[in-house]
Image (spheres, grey):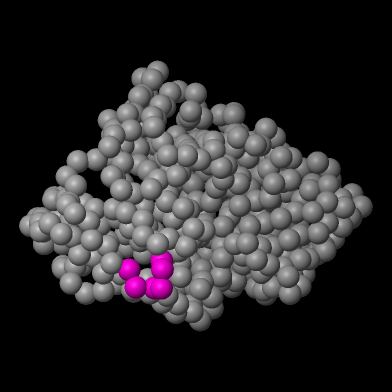
């Protein structure tokens, strides 16, 4: 039998009750299934969430809670998210932030934008960024529809237009326009060819690969790799930034995401901004063909949670499983195969893509803090943050990709 070092008692202890809030993004997920099970995969209870995504479920000391987000079954390639974590103390609440349901409604067009630079430029392609969408055009002749998603708190429209020739930047213009009655004309006097610069300092011998995203009124712009200096585009109103830093050595990556709650003026990274690296140790240890079990070697890089992040395909369905546990854990078993999960079990001879991560957030000094803040698995396109994103601070993680052979 596998042992879970996160266990706080035996499977035979008396059962208790907790309340699980299953959210899809920021709203309740009424189609979520909540399962309570032991660390060795024995079912304790299961329940469908109510219309607001809540479920009060029986549990036990040392038990695990798994929440299944069904995704969109009508999609050509469906994605199901399964989040497993340690059950909190009896009588507590546990919130899981899963991936938001896809918005299939057409965008609401609230106006149009005409871009009419007064100075000509030699270019064969134009990239127009509006924060909500990025468009690539061969000319700037046709008006561009503006959807409501492009307008945030101030009822203005921000934009960055980059002109390229044979793939090289020839010039750019940026600005903020009042929405007015819906018809906007952007008519800059001249194209800019130089940017402002945010100096980057690397200390203690670290040499991370860096990229960033700049935010204007909460909308993302100018995502790109940076080195030496980070470019600031004249005319773009920048009020926040997100910087990604990674030190990679084969399958081992030290990764830090820094949130800056103002326009950045300088960037500095040193050894203390990264968790120490961990050695690959994740292994498949299935006890039966229908059981997916994982083991790994406990590490102490300083994180407040460990996340085993796996993805595999069952037909046209992508299954994403995040097992978020205390950092001293060394194993976990996929939830018991009820009728829903039976269709998601890892196919015979299949090997999932796998990532073992130790995660440290600025507001989480222990795993109890992680549970109290809720588990964030709300980004279906990448490994989740696990801990909430800080407004001003950074999330550090130490990753090891793949499995070791046994």
Give coordinates of residue 403: x percent, y percent: 47, 45
Q: Is residue 86 left or right of residue 346?
A: right
| Residue at (35% x, 24% y) in the render | 201
User: Can residue 347 be seen?
Assistant: no
Give coordinates of residue 92: x percent, y percent: 83, 51
| Residue at (69% x, 59% y) in the render | 66
User: Can residue 268 be seen?
Assistant: yes
Q: Name which quarter of the figure residue 158 lies in.
A: bottom left
Give the farthest residue toward the right: 14
Up-down relation of residue 218 to residue 348 (above or below):
above
Query: Residue 182 colored magenta?
Result: yes
Give coordinates of residue 165: x percent, y percent: 10, 55
- The foreground one among 246 and 260 is 260
- The foreground one among 375 and 335 is 375
Up-down relation of residue 205 to residue 7 (above or below):
above
| Residue at (15% x, 55% y) in the render | 164
Q: Is residue 223 left or right of residue 395?
A: left
Count of numbered tags: 0
- The foreground one among 221 and 152 is 152
Give coordinates of residue 148: x percent, y percent: 46, 70
| Residue at (56% x, 62% y) in the render | 99
Classified by dominant secondary structure, the portion drawn in magenta counts as loop
Q: Which span is picked out in magenta? A: 179-184
Up-down relation of residue 99 to residue 213 (above or below):
below
Query: Residue 38 colored magenta?
Result: no
Q: Name which quarter of the figure residue 138 lies in.
A: bottom left
């Amino acid at each position: 039998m596998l042992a879970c070092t996160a266990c706080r008692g035996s499977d035979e202890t008396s059962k208790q009750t907790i309340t699980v809030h299953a959210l899809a993004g920021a709203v309740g997920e009424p189609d979520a299934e909540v399962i309570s099970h032991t660390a060795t995969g024995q079912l304790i209870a299961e329940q469908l969430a109510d219309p607001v995504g809540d479920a009060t479920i029986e549990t036990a000391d040392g038990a695990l809670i798994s929440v299944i987000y069904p995704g969109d079954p009508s999609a050509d390639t469906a994605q199901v998210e399964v989040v497993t974590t340690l059950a909190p103390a009896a009588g507590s609440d546990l919130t899981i932030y899963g991936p938001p349901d896809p918005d299939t409604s057409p965008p609401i067009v609230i106006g149009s934008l005409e871009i009419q630079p007064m100075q000509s430029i030699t270019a064969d392609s134009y990239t127009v960024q509006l924060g909500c969408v990025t468009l690539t055009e061969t000319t700037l002749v046709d008006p561009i529809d503006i959807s409501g998603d492009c307008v945030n708190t101030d009822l203005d429209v921000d934009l960055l237009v980059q002109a390229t020739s044979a793939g090289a930047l020839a010039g750019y213009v940026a600005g903020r326009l009042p929405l007015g009655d819906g018809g906007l004309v952007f008519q800059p006097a001249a194209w800019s060819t130089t940017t402002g610069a945010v100096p980057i300092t690397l200390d203690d011998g670290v040499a991370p690969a860096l990229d960033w995203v700049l935010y204007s009124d909460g909308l993302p712009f100018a995502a790109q790799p940076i080195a030496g200096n980070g470019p600031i585009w004249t005319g773009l109103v920048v009020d926040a930034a997100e910087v990604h830093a990674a030190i990679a050595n084969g399958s081992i990556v030290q990764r830090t995401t820094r949130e800056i709650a103002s326009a950045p003026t300088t960037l500095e990274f040193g050894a203390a901004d990264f968790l120490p690296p961990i050695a690959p140790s994740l292994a498949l240890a299935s006890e039966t063909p229908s059981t997916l079990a994982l083991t790994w070697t406990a590490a102490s890089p300083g994180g407040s949670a460990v996340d085993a992040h796996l993805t595999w395909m069952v037909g046209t369905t992508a299954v994403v499983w995040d097992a978020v546990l205390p950092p001293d854990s060394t194993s976990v078993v996929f939830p018991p195969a009820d009728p829903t999960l039976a269709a998601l079990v890892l196919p015979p001879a299949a090997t999932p893509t796998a990532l073992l991560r130790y995660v440290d957030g600025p507001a989480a000094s222990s795993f109890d803090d992680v549970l109290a803040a809720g588990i964030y698995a709300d980004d279906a396109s990448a490994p989740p943050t696990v801990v909430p994103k800080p407004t001003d601070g950074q999330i550090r993680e130490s990753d090891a990709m793949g499995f070791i052979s046994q």
